[in-house]
Amino acid sequence: MPAEETVASEVGQTLREAGADVVFGVVGSGNFHVTNALVGAGARFVAARHEGGAATMADAYARASGGLGVLSVHQGPGLTNAMTGIAEAAKSRTPLVVLAAEATSRLSNFWVDQNALARAVGALPRRVNSARSARADTLTAVATAQSERRTVILNLPLDVQQQRVEGGNRFGLLPGGTTVHPREDDIAALAALLNEAERPVFIAGRGARLADAGEALAALAERAGALLATSAAARGLFRGDPFDLDVSGGFATPLAAELIRAADLIVGWGCGLNMWTLRHGTLIAPDAKVAQVDTEQDALGRHRRVDLGVVGDATDTAWQVADRVPAKRGYRSREIARLLQTEGRWPQIPFTDRSTADRIDPRTLSTELNTLLPVERTVAVDSGNFMGYPVMYLDVPDGEGLVFTQAYQSIGLGLATAIGAALARPDRLTVAALGDGGALMSITELETAVREQIGLLIVVYNDAAYGAEVHHFGPHGDDLATVTFPDTDIAAIARGFGCQAATVRSPQDLKAVAPWLAGPRERPLLLDAKVAADEASWWLEEAFRGH
């Protein structure tokens, strides 16, 4: 390193050393030098077409890779444009560092209180304060993001960026992560609950998935005779286990809901046990006991009362408790194993096909795709009335298979989610499942996917409406003119961006998929699926109950 460098180059190099392999963003004058420093140090920079898309790409990259997400934005409007994606990441506890240039003079057109913006959406504001502290400030932001699973906005003031850094002033080390060990009495109490239970159910959330707790929880469940389930965000964590119920909550199969309701003990592992995962509490029997394991004290009992709260890492806690639980059959009967084998997944459950001459039933579309597509896949799902169909009918191979940016319930994040996930897992086919509203809101990022030669399969469930509002307000006789639209040829728009595209009105129209799958996949394939939308999705009722 030369004897003198600027703060901008120091921050870029430090971030690269700390694990910034892929960086997303939109470059302006304020983040030009620091972004170039990242690239010069070996990071891959993915230029999105909107900061909102870049933020969601970085979020999804961190989720799918298990590593650090990094976003680079211009001061002021660059940051405000990214705020919806940042809010989603912050609510999801994604380890993300947002490198934000900062105007410090209130006379600047770009000035805005960036610290207040960060706090408003649950992110942590930090600042590079001087040339002397630049490296330490940057490493602290990274350490906080990784060890606490937080989204950190690291402000880089314009005047500080140009300060010179003496080579001898480089200091600061990246602290290692720490495991939160449970207390001895909590281990004993949880073991006692499991020993007493006859029908225990484990529900693992994204916190357990991030802790690589799947193996430990599956082993403990087998020993305690527990059935296994996940929140939607951790779907696939127990795939292959004969006693996997799949998703608990709004997307649960009828069989899974019945078995969870009959449990006498529910244990949440890195799972909020919120209204979505427990259907507003209706999945818990009145006499069932509830325990919750989480690394943070304030997460325990946040959404519902628990009989036992354990502060501890899910993996460590599960292994320690397993040593105290004698092996028993519990809830794991041959009859339940047989039922789960025959009706434990949505694609196995018969339905009445509502397809018409020019509209395909979204369940038919999803089940056909489930059969056509390779097993090794990543499914990225946007928000909207349609979203349950890909979540329920498109299988995922493991706990990394579903990237579900739903903590903020914003539409329009799905396409960027898929781009970030695809770059994190190029070994898998990434499927973007979007509604037409979210697709059109974010369609500018098709250019990003084409330019980066990302082989996405993009499936648009196109009902020419904001379907959630149509089905929520329509039955009351409200005027729906503001939420319905003329049919849009999204396939034609996609071709204009350089994608391959096809319109799907029947299963026969999916013939475009096979040759694309067999080819080099150097550009996305978009399926504009004209879906039947005469009935509301039943999970939509759950969503509006939570508003």
Image: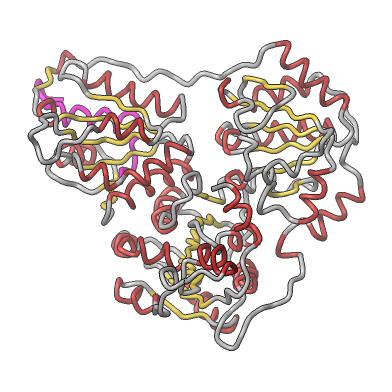
Q: Quadrant of the N terminus?
A: top left
The percent coordinates of residue 203 (x first, y second) are: 70, 38
Residue, far top: 184
Q: Nearer the viewer, residue 51 or 421?
A: 51
The percent coordinates of residue 330 (x first, y second) are: 89, 35
The percent coordinates of residue 229 (x first, y second) are: 71, 43
In the shown orientation, is residue 333 left or right of residue 350? right
Q: Quadrant of residue 36?
A: top left
Residue located at (31% from left, 29% from top): 17
- Classify 36 as above or below 451: above
Residue located at (36% from left, 46% from top): 84
Residue located at (92% from left, 51% from top): 335
The percent coordinates of residue 453 (x first, y second) are: 34, 62
- Classify 51 as above or below 392: above
Q: Quadrant of residue 155?
A: top left
- Classify 493 as above or below 405: below
In the shown orientation, is residue 227 left or right of residue 281? right
In the shown orientation, is residue 310 left or right of residue 162? right
In the shown orientation, is residue 289 left or right of residue 270? right
Residue 499 drawn in magenta: no
Q: Nearer the viewer, residue 186 or 418?
A: 186
Residue, far front: 477
Residue located at (51% from left, 78% from top): 530
Question: Magenta region: which residues?
Answer: 1-24
Residue, far bottom: 357
